[in-house]
Protein backbone atom coordinates (compact mmCIF):
# COMPACT_ATOMS: atom_id res chain seq x y z
CA UNK A 1 0.00 0.00 0.00
CA UNK A 2 2.97 2.29 0.57
CA UNK A 3 4.00 1.79 -3.05
CA UNK A 4 0.51 2.72 -4.23
CA UNK A 5 0.62 5.90 -2.18
CA UNK A 6 4.07 6.72 -3.59
CA UNK A 7 2.56 6.66 -7.08
CA UNK A 8 0.19 9.39 -5.90
CA UNK A 9 3.13 11.47 -4.71
CA UNK A 10 4.82 11.28 -8.09
CA UNK A 11 1.53 12.19 -9.79
CA UNK A 12 1.27 15.29 -7.60
CA UNK A 13 4.90 16.20 -8.31
CA UNK A 14 4.35 15.73 -12.06
CA UNK A 15 1.29 17.98 -11.96
CA UNK A 16 3.43 20.81 -10.61
CA UNK A 17 5.55 20.90 -13.75
CA UNK A 18 4.82 22.03 -17.27
CA UNK A 19 3.71 19.29 -19.67
CA UNK A 20 6.56 17.28 -21.22
CA UNK A 21 9.34 19.09 -19.38
CA UNK A 22 12.15 16.86 -18.10
CA UNK A 23 10.83 16.99 -14.51
CA UNK A 24 7.29 16.17 -15.68
CA UNK A 25 8.54 13.17 -17.65
CA UNK A 26 10.70 11.98 -14.74
CA UNK A 27 7.87 12.15 -12.20
CA UNK A 28 5.38 10.65 -14.61
CA UNK A 29 7.77 7.77 -15.38
CA UNK A 30 8.29 7.18 -11.65
CA UNK A 31 4.53 7.14 -11.17
CA UNK A 32 4.11 4.53 -13.89
CA UNK A 33 6.97 2.49 -12.40
CA UNK A 34 5.35 2.56 -8.94
CA UNK A 35 1.99 1.56 -10.40
CA UNK A 36 3.63 -1.35 -12.25
CA UNK A 37 5.36 -2.57 -9.11
CA UNK A 38 2.12 -2.16 -7.18
CA UNK A 39 0.17 -4.16 -9.80
CA UNK A 40 2.58 -7.10 -9.57
CA UNK A 41 2.61 -7.05 -5.77
CA UNK A 42 -1.19 -6.70 -5.61
CA UNK A 43 -1.61 -9.76 -7.83
CA UNK A 44 0.65 -11.73 -5.50
CA UNK A 45 -1.24 -10.46 -2.45
CA UNK A 46 -4.63 -11.55 -3.73
CA UNK A 47 -3.15 -14.84 -4.90
CA UNK A 48 -1.90 -15.71 -1.40
CA UNK A 49 -4.56 -14.20 0.86
CA UNK A 50 -8.31 -13.82 1.08
CA UNK A 51 -9.61 -11.10 -1.18
CA UNK A 52 -11.60 -9.51 1.65
CA UNK A 53 -8.46 -9.23 3.79
CA UNK A 54 -6.45 -7.78 0.91
CA UNK A 55 -9.11 -5.16 0.17
CA UNK A 56 -9.40 -4.27 3.83
CA UNK A 57 -5.69 -3.41 3.82
CA UNK A 58 -6.13 -1.17 0.75
CA UNK A 59 -7.91 1.39 2.90
CA UNK A 60 -4.57 2.02 4.62
CA UNK A 61 -3.55 3.96 1.50
CA UNK A 62 -5.66 6.82 2.86
CA UNK A 63 -3.54 6.93 6.00
CA UNK A 64 -0.32 6.90 3.99
CA UNK A 65 -1.65 9.65 1.72
CA UNK A 66 -2.42 11.86 4.72
CA UNK A 67 1.04 11.23 6.12
CA UNK A 68 2.77 12.08 2.83
CA UNK A 69 0.60 15.19 2.41
CA UNK A 70 1.86 16.52 5.73
CA UNK A 71 5.49 15.38 5.52
CA UNK A 72 6.25 16.06 1.86
CA UNK A 73 3.85 18.80 0.78
CA UNK A 74 3.33 20.60 4.09
CA UNK A 75 -0.45 20.22 3.92
CA UNK A 76 -2.53 20.31 7.06
CA UNK A 77 -4.93 17.59 8.09
CA UNK A 78 -8.47 18.84 8.55
CA UNK A 79 -11.19 17.28 10.70
CA UNK A 80 -12.92 16.35 7.44
CA UNK A 81 -9.83 14.42 6.31
CA UNK A 82 -9.77 12.51 9.59
CA UNK A 83 -13.52 11.87 9.57
CA UNK A 84 -13.47 10.65 5.97
CA UNK A 85 -10.52 8.36 6.55
CA UNK A 86 -12.07 6.90 9.70
CA UNK A 87 -15.38 6.42 7.89
CA UNK A 88 -13.80 4.55 4.98
CA UNK A 89 -11.69 2.33 7.23
CA UNK A 90 -14.64 1.63 9.55
CA UNK A 91 -16.85 0.83 6.57
CA UNK A 92 -14.26 -1.55 5.16
CA UNK A 93 -13.99 -3.31 8.52
CA UNK A 94 -17.80 -3.59 8.84
CA UNK A 95 -18.21 -4.96 5.32
CA UNK A 96 -15.45 -7.54 5.86
CA UNK A 97 -16.40 -8.62 9.37
CA UNK A 98 -17.76 -12.13 9.87
CA UNK A 99 -20.80 -11.05 11.85
Image: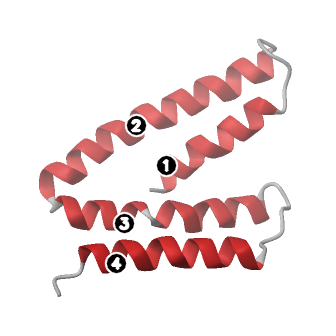
Alpha carbon distance from label 2 to label 4: 26 Å
Residue 51, percent across and down? 19, 58
Which quadrant holds residue 85? bottom right
Residue 27, percent from left and from top:
69, 29
Does residue 22 appear left or right of residue 64 in this picture? right
Q: Which residue: 13% across, 55% down?
A: 48
Is residue 96 placed above or below 3 in the rendered structure?
below
Q: Earlier in the sequence, mark 2 or mark 3?
A: 2
| Front position among marks 1 and 4 | 4
Residue in the foreground of this view, choosing between 26 and 97: 97
Earlier-in-chain disc, 2 versus 4: 2
Q: Which of marks 4 and 3 is nearer the N terminus?
A: 3
Residue identified by numbered label 3: 57
Residue under label 4? 93
Q: In this rendering, which labeled residue sits more in front, label 1 or label 3?
A: 3
Q: Is disc 1 in contact with disc 4, using a CB cutoff of under 8 Å?
A: no
Residue receiving disc 2: 37
- Within-10-Å neighbours for mark 4: few <14, some 14–19, many 20+: some
- Disc assigned to residue 3: 1
Amino acid sequence: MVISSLANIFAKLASGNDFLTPHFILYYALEILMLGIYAVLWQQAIKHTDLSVAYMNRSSVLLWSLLWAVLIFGDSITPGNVAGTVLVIAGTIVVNSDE
